[in-house]
Image: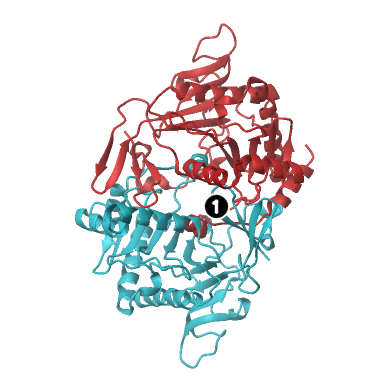
Chain colours: A red, B cyan
Amino acid sequence: MSELRRDPIVGRWVIISSERGGRPTDFEPAAPRPPDAFCPFCEGNEDKTPPEIRAIRAPGTTPNTPGWKIRVVSNKFPALNIEGELDKRARGIYDIMSGIGAHEVFIETPEHERTISTLPPDHVRDLMWMYRERLRDLERDRRLKSILIFRNSGQSAGASLRHPHSQLIATPTIPKRILEELDGVRRYIDFKDRCVFCDMVDEEHTFKQRVVCENEHFISFSPFAARFPFEMWILPKEHQPCFKSVADNQLAPLAAVLQETIKRLDKSLEYPPYNYVIHTSPVNSEINYNYHWHFEIIPRLTHVAGFEWGTGFYINPTPPERAAQFLREVEL
Amino acid sequence: MSELRRDPIVGRWVIISSERGGRPTDFEPAAPRPPDAFCPFCEGNEDKTPPEIRAIRAPGTTPNTPGWKIRVVSNKFPALNIEGELDKRARGIYDIMSGIGAHEVFIETPEHERTISTLPPDHVRDLMWMYRERLRDLERDRRLKSILIFRNSGQSAGASLRHPHSQLIATPTIPKRILEELDGVRRYIDFKDRCVFCDMVDEEHTFKQRVVCENEHFISFSPFAARFPFEMWILPKEHQPCFKSVADNQLAPLAAVLQETIKRLDKSLEYPPYNYVIHTSPVNSEINYNYHWHFEIIPRLTHVAGFEWGTGFYINPTPPERAAQFLREVEL
């Protein structure tokens, strides 16, 4: 089983997952998978993944057989495991926790060559619905403190399989980045008595300089202090702490803004590798009414170098105003 | 001129550097440089770099001509500039600062094909001396708050030129990561009245499980909560807040531990791309006697994926005990 270890200086938790390899020879660069390689996520290969946890499938079809539209399964090589006791202890001067949590895969479509850009709009809406379903289900596990949904697209963004998929990792401790955002939100409220994310939505919507696209419910923009070229965030325009609270009638508008954002990215930069992550309020802890959930979308265009790693201080060669302009002007 | 922008939520500063390119077409993957490509850092090409700021050179030779051993020049495409006023202002709801600072390059040797592993030991010692010299010189500029020295080795670690070099970026604000470490150090002192880094040195030296190599003055080990496979830190065994305080008689022992660490990495993983960064106490602010400077060495073996970016929560497939064992056992 994997374990969680805490950095004694900054309090960052790390998952040490020895089942995933780790010898020096495991790190030789992988050759790109040939396009005709066997794909465990394709329709007909349902027995090659762990059994499905949840699926949207045609009426009358049987779990773990063809006929599905979206399928959620456990990760075959999970970073954290749902079984076991959540055990916290010292090791020497350090702190560890057993590797309890969940690690799931959303197989987004049976079609191997689709992307978020080219799926039918109602299919992307169903994916948002499924994200929300898994959040709502997993938060009932009292051991879990945070649930992160993310998508790695392209080999250099960490995707080991090409077939469209996203992932979910639920952890028994709140990730550092989310804690920092909660702290930041609290400090801003102390000072201004307003939500910093709501202020950003207003500013961006009013001045339009960094907006990529928007509709009644959601706005997509390149943030003022973007760490990466063409970084984009999607926020609900109304204050909403948790992704699980997205209303039914907001799912289609969310899918529309996400899909247009990814389409513009794909067109401008010829299908670049990217990651997105949904930042949402922690679960099973004091409810953070002040948090404001959002997507962060990070195209992987540059190598992050020593300075960035060492400092958390990023160098971004593309002003976000310019990135947003390129993205807005591309023809869809 | 570039500008510094502050993320309004977590307070992270970003350098927005529009002179370095930034259009969508600037991000097409660069072809690897052919081995015989022109190299501005080689001996004889001194006029192809900005003029030297400092050098170690043979007696009687002239600046910006051959005869040098180590040469420091300004970065030709600097992220920050030393000239100008440090201007801080609001832009809408956001905060910006002019891009004042320094960005220098240490050309480590005239020889194109050397590496830290294969330089003579006294040459690595001279490089450490030069790092210390530049720190001591730059901290006299009262506008600067932090000076980071780092090395990108290999194209996928961010090195655009193969010729051995390291870099320095001095910033007018303290990087987030360093602030977090200062906070962590302070909290640990409040709780235990000891330095957390000193405690780590004791623990690692006593139990040896994660040690890569050590001598009287310095210890190299893979940290307990390593974020990355084969991540290593080098610490002075005695409490020492600033790299600028390294004593003359400590330069050779430091070079010895650094060189052995990199040699073991190069042998175990066949010259992998890596970054190192020297974390040292901020300058021109309250002196942080509690800080403990150190090297962080990060081999670039895996793709950092969406989960890591989104959360600051890392998944490391190689337990540091195992990494240290591989590194210790390799024959030099």
- Rendered location of residue A48, percent (x, y): 46, 22
Seen in the picture, residue B207 relative to B151 is either above or below; the reply is above
- Rendered location of residue A92, percent (x, y): 23, 47
Quarter residue A151 falls in = top right
Seen in the picture, residue B152 relative to A205 is either above or below; the reply is below
- Rendered location of residue B173, percent (x, y): 54, 63
Tag 1, which chain?
B
Q: Quadrant of the C terminus of chain A?
A: top right
| Residue with the most extreme bottom position | B60
Seen in the picture, residue B275 relative to A60 is either above or below; the reply is below
Please give left or right for residue A237 compared with residue B113 in the image.
right
Please give left or right for residue A191 compared with residue B301 in the image.
right
Q: Is residue B221 visible?
A: no
Mark 1 = which residue?
Answer: B11
Q: Is residue B134 visible?
A: yes
Tag 1: residue type?
Gly
Crowd around label 1: few <14 · some 14–19 · many ≥20 (10 Å)? some
* Residue at the spot 56% in from the left edge and 80% down from the top edge: B52
* Residue at the spot 51% in from the left edge and 28% down from the top edge: A38
